[in-house]
Amino acid sequence: MYNMDYEKNLENLKTVMANSYDGALITPGSNLFYLTGLNPQNVLERLFLAIVYPQKEPILIIPELFEDEIERSSVNFEEVYVWDDTEDPHEFLSKALKDFEKNHGNLLIEDSMSADVLMKIKEQIGDFSWDPLSLETSRFRKIKSEDEIDYMSKAAEIADKTYERLLEENLIGKTEIEVAARIDYLLKKLGASGSSFETIVASGPNSANPHHFPTKRCLQEGDMVILDFGARYKSYCSDISRTIALGYPPEGAKEVYELVQRALTEAKEILRVDLEAKEVDKKARDIIEEGGYGDNFIHRVGHGIGLDAHEEPYLTGQNEEKIKKGMTFTIEPGIYLKGHFGVRIEDDIWVKDKKSVSLTKSSREMICIK
């Protein structure tokens, strides 16, 4: 069972909306789940929409196929419009939007809303200004509750166990696709509802591509292999990267690995309340630059994590936002030598109090599988 206080989350949104927004239009995704507990999967082209008002209960438009989903919500709806495949859901949309038809003002729109839904809404209530919903929800979602940390800790534990199980297997000769499929299987076997994102297995020269998509390339002796994956547990994510060597690592790999490992360790050590986010990126980047590989660290050092694998706040060199108690991040420095190999090591971090705690705990030492 979930222990989330959806009503509190919804009231927080309504409070900030009161002085600035006439409503919020929300389609399925992490925001809808955070605010209502509704988490429908594979809605596809069917209209599923919640309309939140600052001064009254929300309205819901829902396909009949997903009617059972309502039982999972602990919030009250002013009206629920249930439609079947013989009906035009946009007629219900017209009814639901009636409070907006004669007004103009400001609306919050779900960031991931599909263009066809947005265009239908705009046809009916075009005389409004639009802001992304995350502009408001992110301020609450950045700070995790104890229940959220429990779910994320479990997701991290599943990822750790998956990595440890994988190390027991003979990986040489298997394709990247096969290893990725094995990781996805182990995640579910060990208790995840699924993967947080598309699993990355990048071997040999492919490991120099930070977001490589697994191919039919077989893992070979002498490869460095980046494994980047995460578990989803009760809708919350983990995100872990480990880099292993198959047989004897290539020339220079040990030096690069130790540099990345040091960057990770020292960046984690300084992550604390009231530090500016950019300082975490700077710490890791300075270490890698001093080691002579600054041009080979080609991405930010980390990102927020929670209901989404990537969410605010981001640990970039430009972000001056101050770290707050309850925030959760990944820290993932990497070095990528095109045509040769790459190394990335990543942990999930919780800012517990004045210090931070690593939720992912599996070994960060360089492991050579022979």
Image (cartoon, helix red, strand yellow):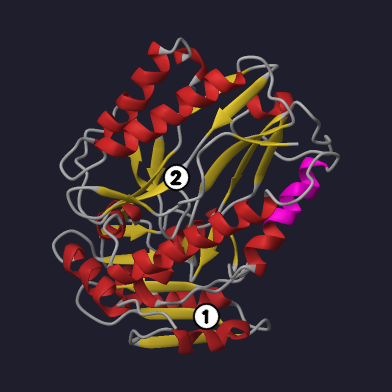
Q: Residue at x 17, y 68 (%)?
A: 15
Residue 365 position in % (x across, y down): 52, 37
Q: Amino acid at mark 2?
A: Asp
Give x and y (percent) for residue 179. 75, 48
Whether 157 is among the magenta residues is: no
Residue 282 occupies which quadrant of the picture? top left
157 above or below 209?
below
Task: Decide which of 307, 148 is in the foreground and name it.
Answer: 148
Point out the frontmost of discs 2 and 1: 2
Which image quarter holds the C terminus? top right
Q: Residue at the front extreme?
A: 370
Most common secondary structure along the magenta stretch: helix
Q: Determine which residue is flagged by label 2.
A: 347
Task: Indicate yes or no whether the magenta region holds residue 177.
Answer: yes
Query: What amino acid type is highlighted by mark number 1?
Result: Ile
**Left or right for 24, reference 325:** right
- Residue 116 visible? The answer is no
The local secondary structure at tag 2 comes to strand
Residue at disc 1, secondary structure: strand
Q: Position of residue 305 (x, y in %)?
A: 41, 52
| Visible residue check, residue 197 | yes
Q: Which mark sits nearer the N-terminus, 2 or 1? A: 1
The quadrant in which the N terminus is found is bottom left
Question: Does residue 247 lie above or below 253 as drawn?
Answer: below
In the rendered structure, are the residues bearing label 2 and label 1 in contact, judged by CB atoms less than 8 Å apart? Answer: no
Q: Residue at x 43, y 87 (%)?
A: 80
Q: Disc 1 designates what residue?
A: 62
Q: Position of residue 349 (x, y in %)?
A: 36, 49
Query: Neighbour class for label 1 at 10 Å: few (<14), some, many (≥20)?
Result: many
Stretch of the chain drawn in magenta? 175-183
The one of 246 and 230 positioned closer to us in this rendering: 246
Tell me the residue at 34%/18% (across/down).
286
